[in-house]
Amino acid sequence: MQAEQTVLAGTALARPATAPRAALRAHQSLTSRLLEFAQRKPLGAAGAVIVLVLVLVALGAPWLAPYPFDVGVASVRLQGPSLAHPFGTDANGRDMLSRIIWGARISVTVGFGAVLISTVLATMIGVISGYFGGLFDLLFQRLIDIWISFPALVLLVSLVAVLGPGLWSVTIILGVLVTPGSSRVIRSAVIAMRHLPYVETANCLGAGHVRIIVRHVLPNVFVPILILATVRLGTAILAEATVSFLGYGIPPPYPAWGAMLSGTGRAYMLQSPWMSIWPGLAISLAVFGFNMLGDALRDVLDPRLRGTR
């Protein structure tokens, strides 16, 4: 009896140590996978670091910005980089570093918002069109053809001019315009798995269409959706910068990177080149980061490309 109690006590004492060991193994596995990803795809890892820094800067803009983005001091206008203003000041005496930091919040908000809208719409259209086929597919694809036939930039500027410039109007319009191309890719993936054995088996067992789509189709098209969303983020940020550069983006005094390149940025380009260098560099790094991360995720997660370098 005493020996049995001793064994039970030893078992009870050993159990709590199982969870920390499992957590440690999971942490080591995650770390090893991240290191392997960085070794296989160094550009993808660099893109992931850029994206992470961009998101952190956007979230911490109120605390990271050394000055208010909309308050200028006339005595320091067009001042070059210095200890007080590392990125210099603009024509209104506003700190460029603070405006770049707050511009990251606008770009991240527009980018992620537009991609979220386009991903939801593209998934709905692609899954319905690819899964049901027939009349649904014919109707949706003809609408997509009409949708794609319009020049994207012209349509974007026209819709923003009609609805009025603003953060949410630009985000919604960008999300809607990015949808058609993504829906075609998702539709192709759904068509490829529509006649697979496990889908036909679920259908023969009496599973409804909604259950088959939720349980079998969507989980298997998640990887293409994730890759598309990552790549589209760079496209959305670049499109927002283009619209802002043309004067149809986020209205002042909010600091959009594209708007910084236009107006006073062009007028004082030779006299104060930092007014154009920093926003241009920020746009380039953001687009580069998302594109490299998206390409690396595609190479790693796509079964057809897995193992390639």
Image (tube, rainbow, N blue to C red):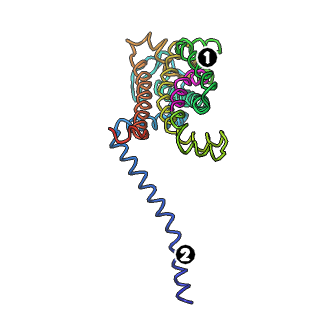
Q: How many marks?
A: 2
Whether pointer 2 and pointer 1 mark residues with C-beta atoms closer than 8 Å, the reply is no
Q: Which quarter of the rendered picture does the C terminus lie within? A: top left
SS at mark 2 in the image: helix
Q: Position of residue 269 (x, y in %)?
A: 40, 13
Q: Where 198 falls versus 180 (above or below)?
A: below
Magenta stretch, overall SS: helix
As for residue 173 lying within the magenta part, the answer is: yes
> Which amino acid type is marked by label 2?
Ala
Image point (40%, 15%), residue name = 272
Q: Position of residue 288 (x, y in %)?
A: 40, 28
In the rendered image, which quarter is residue 283 located in? top left
Q: Give the side of residue 118 with respect to residue 97, left or right.
A: right
Measured Cα–Cα span from mark 2 to mark 1: 64 Å
SS at mark 1 in the image: loop
Q: Which residues are magenta?
A: 172-188
> Which amino acid type is marked by label 1?
Pro
In the rendered image, which quarter is residue 121 located in? top right
Q: Position of residue 190 (x, y in %)?
A: 54, 34
- The residue to which callout 2 is attached is 12
Q: Give the side of residue 13 with respect to residue 143, left or right.
A: left
Q: Where 97 falls versus 25 (above or below)?
A: above
- The residue to which callout 1 is attached is 165
Image point (60%, 29%), residue name = 133
How crowded pointer 2 is (Cα within 10 Å; few <14, some 14-19, many 20+) is rated as: few
In the rendered image, which quarter is residue 249 located in? top right
* Of marks 2 and 1, the one in the foreground: 2
